[in-house]
Amino acid sequence: MKSISKYLFFLLPIFILGCKSNKDNGDVIYFGGNIITMEDKFPQVEALVLKGGKIIFVGPRNKADAYVGGNTEKVDLKGKTLLPGFIDVHGHITSRAGMEQAIDLSPSPYGTVNSIPDLQKTLKLLFSVKRLILPFPF
């Protein structure tokens, strides 16, 4: 009994310290492709680990494996590229849609209105096609 206690006294701390906590495990690891970070220090890395929707590690694949646990989803990019998410706070897509309602009176090379007669012709065509009421007679 004394020899077992002696082994437990030495082995139990080693066993406990050797166990990794689940709190260190990531939810998802991405690897196997071009992972672009847009950071000057690490513009491209081999692996990226997420936990709770936040990046907890970027770097070499062999070091990222320390964050892989039994429930970690492993995503092999198979040579594809992973980019950071871009949030466009100044988008023109909606204004472009609104431009479909506008009259294009641009001159060459973008449009066809290069003179007063061109302007009159374009407006007459527009109002006849869209059946709009002319604000003044032509």
Image (spheres, rainbow, N blue to C red):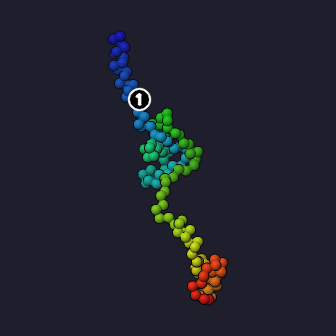
User: Which residue does the numbered mark 1 point to in the structure image?
Assistant: 19
Name the residue located 62 percent from the left edge and 86 percent from the top edge: 120
Q: Quadrant of the C terminus?
A: bottom right
User: In terms of depth relative to the viewer, which is nearer, 101 or 82?
Assistant: 101
Total marks placed:
1
Percent across and percent down for residue 116 are: 60, 88
Residue 113 can be seen, yes or no: no
**How far from the left and from the top, in percent, is residue 122?**
63, 82
Instruction: Please give the name of the residue rendered at 52% of the width and 39% of the height, measured from the top-left corner.
Output: 73
| Rendered position, 121 above or below 41 | below
Residue 104 as seen in the image, left or right of residue 63: right
Q: SS class of the residue under badge 1? A: loop
18 left or right of 116 in image: left
- Where is residue 127 shown, x and y percent of the image? 63, 80
Q: Residue at x 34, y 15 (%)?
A: 5
The foreground one among 15 and 107 is: 107
Compared with residue 132, is residue 26 higher up or lower down, i.e. above or below? above
Which is more toward the observer, 98 or 89? 98
Q: Is residue 123 visible?
A: yes
x%, y% of residue 75? 54, 42
At x 55%, y 47%, the residue is 33
* Mark 1 surroundings: few (<14), some (14-19) or many (≥20) residues within 10 A: few
Q: If the image is split into quadrants, where does the N terminus sit?
A: top left
Query: Which of the 4 image quarters holds residue 10?
Result: top left
Q: Amino acid at mark 1?
A: Cys
